[in-house]
Amino acid sequence: MVKVYCYPKCSTCRKAIKYLNEQMVEYDLTDIKEDNPDKKTLKEAIDISGLPIKKLFNTSGNLYKEMKISSKLPSMSEDEMLELLSSDGMLVKRPLLISDNYALIGFKEDQWKEVLRLIRIEQMEERFDRGTDEDKIILSSYYETLWKDDFEADEKGLIPKDMKRGVLSEDGLYNLLQQ
């Protein structure tokens, strides 16, 4: 399941939620101020994203500035940073999207676009596995639309080899490419 930590009053978070809805991605929304992510969740986000832990800090937030965290970070261990971040959701850069395979910190549409496409495909596969025959027909049509976009982008040389996900088979599903 995709979990998204947001602050309802944040305009960037509202843009991200609107974008998630437009992309038809299923997600669980959590108010980062009321239910801030714990150390384990924050560590997973860093591990999955590959970003340095300092990228998790909301450096433009009032609390970050009031606590003068920028001067403290150089001497803090990763565990201390995680402890601090987990103490108050307002210290965490938002929105924060976490799934089993992906983590996005902050909202940049171009970064979210590719990841949400992959998440949407995973969610469609799960629905396909659970679906009725009618659902499978609808989902197969949706797959064709997704993969048609990939074909066109690949023909133009816009998809790097390591990002190619697959090709359509005769029944409208895809077979993974051999990399």
Image: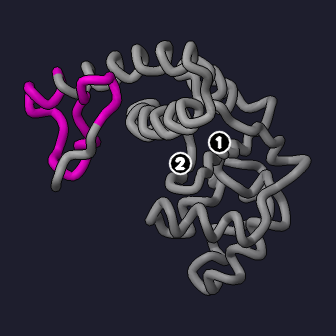
User: Where does residue 84 sit, x and y in percent of width and height?
Assistant: 77, 72
Residue 154 higher or lower than 65, as above or below: above
Q: Residues within 10 Å of mark 2 (few under 14, many from 20)?
A: many
Q: Earlier in the sequence, mark 2 or mark 1?
A: 1
Residue denoted by label 2: 104
Does residue 134 appear to the left or right of 1 in the view shown?
left
Q: Given the image, on which type of amino acid does mark 2 rest?
A: Leu
Does residue 159 appear to the left or right of 157 in the view shown?
right
Q: Residues within 10 Å of mark 1 (few under 14, many from 20)?
A: many
Q: Look at the numbered discs 2 and 1 and tell me whether their residues touch, using CB distance below 8 Å.
A: yes
Query: CA–CA distance between discs 2 and 1?
Result: 8 Å
Farthest residue, direction right: 34
User: Where does residue 151 sit, x and y in percent of width and height?
Assistant: 18, 25
Could you tell me which secondary element the residue under label 1 belongs to? loop
Q: Tell me where the magenta segment starts and ends, as one range.
A: 152-174
Q: Which mark is residue 103?
A: none
Query: Residue 50 in magenta?
Result: no
Q: Which mark is residue 95?
A: 1
Does residue 134 appear to the left or right of 17 in the view shown?
left
